[in-house]
Image (cartoon, helix red, strand yellow):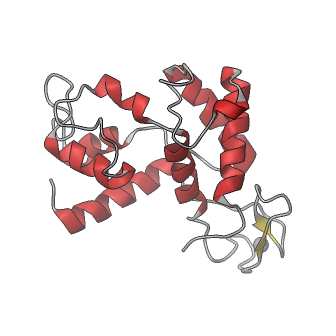
Amino acid sequence: MGQNLVTEEKVFGELKKAVVETLRADENKIKPETSLIKDLGAESLDFLDINYRLEQALGIKMARHFVLEHIEEIYGEGTALDENGQLTDKAVAVLKIRFGENVAELRPGMDMDEIPALVTAQSMVSGVMDILDSLPEKCTKCGASSWKSEDGVRVKCGSCGEAAEYANGDDLIKAWLTKVQEEKKLF
Ligand SMILES: [Zn+2]
């Protein structure tokens, strides 16, 4: 699937707005590689606020749980984090597939508390793009395939006007994990 009504650039713009409003950060300091925690001083509650603003702006549902929590939920306790709350080899393998080999800090034995600092503006934008790309081919209300967007942010049906309905972020992470498991047989 996929969609080409809302561009990555537009999403980055919406993320910047959300971050500026939540953290009172200087917009010019927000680059794709910026860590919201390390570089902008975000705390975990701020992510709820930023996610909420993105949800309102784009008409989506962001994931409530991180990849590691989904791994433990699907494959069992201890699969992602050991008894000391440190990343397992398998968790590192999954995170590298998702966030790229170049996340140098990722290593087995890393403390889970260090993970949120790895969240960058780009990783948030990618998560949002995954959700937007779940746009179904046809409108769920009238069946037409004529999605359109006037502002490049909100998508609606060009036939009946219904707002686009996307898959939610958590369901997409679960589906992605299942696909990774089928290919890599990690767990
Ligand atoms: Zn429709």
* 33 sits left or right of 49 in the view: left
Q: Measuring 25% from the left and 40% from the top, which residue is drawn there?
A: 72
* 81 sits left or right of 25 in the view: left
Q: Number of numbered discs present?
A: 0
Q: Give coordinates of residue 55: x percent, y percent.
A: 66, 43
Query: Ligand 1 is found in which quarter of the picture?
Result: bottom right
Q: Quadrant of residue 131?
A: bottom right
Asked if residue 173 is positioned above or below residue 181 in the image, the reply reads: above
Q: Measuring 55% from the left and 29% from the top, which residue is drawn there?
A: 47
Q: Measuring 14% from the left and 30% from the top, which residue is drawn there?
A: 82
Asked if residue 14 is positioned above or below residue 184 in the image, the reply reads: above
Q: Give coordinates of residue 46: x percent, y percent.
A: 58, 23
Q: Give coordinates of residue 45: x percent, y percent.
A: 54, 21
Question: From the image, which quarter does the N terminus lie in?
Answer: bottom right
Q: Measuring 71% from the left and 44% from the top, which residue is drawn there?
A: 14
Decide if residue 59 is in sight here: no
Q: Nearer the viewer, residue 37 or 164?
A: 37
* 38 sits left or right of 49 in the view: left
The extreme front residue here reads 28
Decide if residue 19 is in sight here: yes
Q: Quadrant of residue 166?
A: bottom right
Asked if residue 9 is positioned above or below residue 79 in the image, the reply reads: below
Q: Nearer the viewer, residue 77 or 110?
A: 110
Q: Quadrant of residue 16?
A: top right
